[in-house]
Image (cartoon, coloured by chain):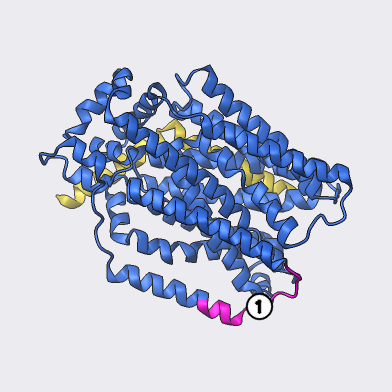
Amino acid sequence: MAEKSATQKSAGIWTSILTDAHFWVPVIVLIAGLLVLQWIR
Amino acid sequence: MDPLSPRVNSATRNPKMLSTSPETARLRKLQLVGILCGFGAGAWLGAAEAPTKLVKLGVSPLVVSLLMVVGVFLARWSFPALIRGTGQMRNDIRQAPHLIVWGILAGCLWAVANTLTIFAIRDIGLSIAFPLWNINSLLGIFWGYLLFNELRDAGKLRWLSVLGGALLMFTGATLLAVASSAQSPAAHPFRGIAAALAAGVLWGTMYVPYRKAYLTGMNPLSFIAFFTIGELGMMLTLALLYGGGPDALFHQLELAEPVLFWLMLGGFVWVIGDLFQQYAAKYIGISRGIPLSNTNQLWGLLWGILVFGELRGLSPSLYAQVIGGSLLMAAGAGAIALSSVGAKEHARWKQAAEREAQRYKVDAAYVQAALSGRDAVTNASSATSTRNPSDSDARPAPQSSRSWLDYLLVIAATTIFITLTVLARAPNLSLNWPALVALAAAMVIFLLAGAVALWKTTRFN
């Protein structure tokens, strides 16, 4: 029961993170930075 | 429900209530602490580069960066672990587990940005690269405004102070960078400019997770733990990818053995600067905290000129540039420091914090306590108890004691540092010792003043 609740809570946190526009701003910038690094090196 | 919450929520809707409540006095105190931390961050972050100047071996810049990050990681687990034990960190995670992701993400952004600066300096030189990546403070202001309600309802004068101050600092930084670098290699100018701009964007965006964490209530000491994990993981990956694989990296690390101490000392100094920066971001926001931390360039220049004898025999016009640039940076920092957060703007910050609390289902009492610089965990857990709100205004709640794990971590990290000290080779450089002592004393003064102010006002919350 407790295990199920913990799993649900964890899934809920990930849903909140992945649907948060604030999360995608740094993620997109990080990916773009890695692409620039790959290009210039 | 925390007895403070109804009052705070009404104040959010009606900012005028704040101006007549004890909250105003508390807010002013927190802002002064934040400003002090911003200047302290500048002094310590600027000095972090000094030990790396002692490294004259043919070690790859990527390895230099990696070793500094290892120093940062170790330093996090040395004396900061004594300030607030790992038990407190576990409490933070229980309250806001999603912030682990934000901490690691911020560390990854830092590592990629730092690596980009290495390539930018190689391609276009420091004088052009530095002002380009210094756009991070302008971007920080933009993200602060757009995502976290900073500078909203702040009034024209405060806008003018912050934006004008940031622009003054940017101009000053440009003058200093041009004066402090005579080299102008331009093998790949376009690639170099792209790298420097990308570094600025990454560093400016890195403060999004910072602000996110502090609006939700995480303690800077907990946040920096996850930050260093992300930073070390990403830096190690980059060093392996771009350094020629594990064997080549190991060979470089062997070459660096005599200078390991100096590089890790740089990391140690950096951690203290970054901790100050984190507290500045927490109490004055990223739109003010980042520009103040960017005074690190001024301190870096002071170390270069006074201790390492750089820029000797310059032309009078270059000296004028250095003095002019320094004055502009100081004026910009002063303008930002004087732009306090008013009651209306602070009410907007609280709205942003409420959004975070609702989205991530974080205890409102925990979030509000953290925003007010109080022990968030204790406040959240004792929210149901009857308490006079004015008591918590005056006295932050006590901290729990450290565990055996904390002492073990401190002993392990300190032992590694002592071993590296024994292995270290004394630098063969002529240093201006009186200047070194004076600058080190200034750093210690900032450290003591900042630590005492943080302890008295927030108990490092």
- Span highlighted in magenta in the image: B418-431
Residue B171 percent coordinates (x, y): 72, 34
Chain letter for the part of the structure drawn in blue: B
Q: Position of residue B270 (x, y in %)?
A: 55, 57
Residue farthest to the left? B386
Residue B196 location, x and y as percent?
71, 43
Q: Residue at x 40, y 33 (%)?
A: A19
Amino acid beneath label 1: Pro
Residue B423 lies within the magenta run: yes
Tell me the residue at 65%/53% (across/down): B115
Which residue does the image show at 31% across and 24% down from the upper left?
B18
For the question of whether residue B356 can be seen, the reply is no
**SS for dot 1:** helix
- Farthest residue to the bottom: give it: B422
Image location (x, y in percent) of residue B126: 76, 48
Judge left or right: residue B427 versus residue B108: right
Q: Quadrant of the N terminus of chain B?
A: top left
Figure label count: 1
Residue occupied by mark 1: B258
Judging by colour alone, the chain drawn in yellow in this rendered image is A
Does residue B422 lie above or below B262 as drawn? below
- Residue A11 against residue B21 in the figure, above or below: below
Q: Chain of mark 1?
A: B
Relative to the observer, which residue lies in front, B367 or B4?
B4
> Are there few (<14), some (14-19), or many (20+) residues within 10 Å of tag 1?
some
Query: Is B144 on the left or on the right of B347, as rendered?
Result: right
